[in-house]
Image: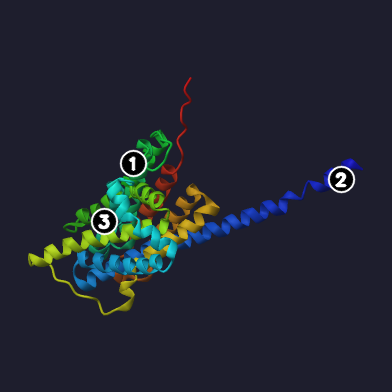
Amino acid sequence: MTKATSTAAVPAPAPRKLARGATTALLVVATVLAGMLSPMQSAVNGALGKAVGDGNSAAVISFGSGLVLMIVVIFARPSTRRQALRIPSLIRSGGIGWWNYLAGLCGAAVVLSEGISVGALGVAVFQIALISGMIISGVVCDRIGVTATVQQPISVARACGAVLAIIATAVAISPSFHVPGAIALAVLPFAAGLLAGWQPAGNAAVARGTGSVLVSIGVNFLVGFIVLGIGLLIRIGTGSATFSLPGTWWMYLGGVLGLASIALMALLVRGLGLLLLGLASVAGQLVGSLLLDLAVPSVGQPVHLVTVLGTVLALVAAGIGMLPSRRKESS
């Protein structure tokens, strides 16, 4: 009798396991879709750069729209308003290292490179170069221990992932090697990706000091907007730039798309964890980039076979780069 009871109870966990698997699958699909917001933002900012004829102006408009939205969100709630108003006292007391407030410069570099190079490179090549830079930066920052409490040694697999990321960028941009300045344009998102590896550490420090992730994101937009704005004002003053606003409403959505991507990733990471979230979001960014270039060729360059190959290589590099290293135990 006992034996029959225990036998009947064995299949019980199966439905729960299936339910967990189905939930994880749905969260992965949601993360892939959320990852597609990044190439959409690149496409919007790239089109904005073309429309206003200046990548710096496009970046200021994009950051400005995101900053306005963040101010509304933060100051609409008494708790986040109080947390935001604590920042001046935290700066004076040195409660948060001043360098952490500069994390917004990393985002500014990404948006600036979007306005300058997406129109010439296309969304797919831009995203491959950006993600490749982020992979290398992530490997190095993990080794130093910048973005985590535990250092990740540079294993053979992680080193191969970093090298593969560089190869992916070279392969993706190869059809444009003959175009003057194409390599320099590809270096912009690659360098922005290298900077972006440190950004989470700065954001996390500001979030801990203020007690709010929203305030941390708001500081990002504020710092980026100020720096980009100062740069634009200097260029206007020297006669090397002009400023104009586009007449097309959707060109103001770059900052909003960036905020939506950050918010969704913050929600989805709770159900997936960092590794699955990272892989799924990179897949969304790369696949979304290809789809955008195919569906809307006016945002950039035609999709070549090597662009698809570069996308696959970058995705494999991301998977390898995200693998945790095995730490040697001290004897």
Among numbered discs 3 and 1, the one appearing first in the sequence: 3
93 is higher (above) or lower (below) than 258 = above
Most foreground residue, 62 or 12: 62
Among numbered discs 2 and 3, the one appearing first in the sequence: 2
Q: Residue furthest bottom?
A: 247
Amino acid at circle 2:
Thr
32 is higher (above) or lower (below) than 134 = below
Amino acid at circle 3:
Ala
State the SS at label 1: helix
Q: CA distance from mark 2 to mark 3?
A: 64 Å
Give percent across and percent down for residue 217.
Answer: 37, 58
Kindly identify which residue carries mark 1.
Answer: 163
Q: CA distance from mark 3 to mark 1?
A: 23 Å
Amino acid at circle 1:
Val
Q: Are marks 3 and 1 in contact (CB under 8 Å)?
A: no
Q: Which mark is residue 109?
A: 3
Residue plotted at (38% across, 54% down): 311
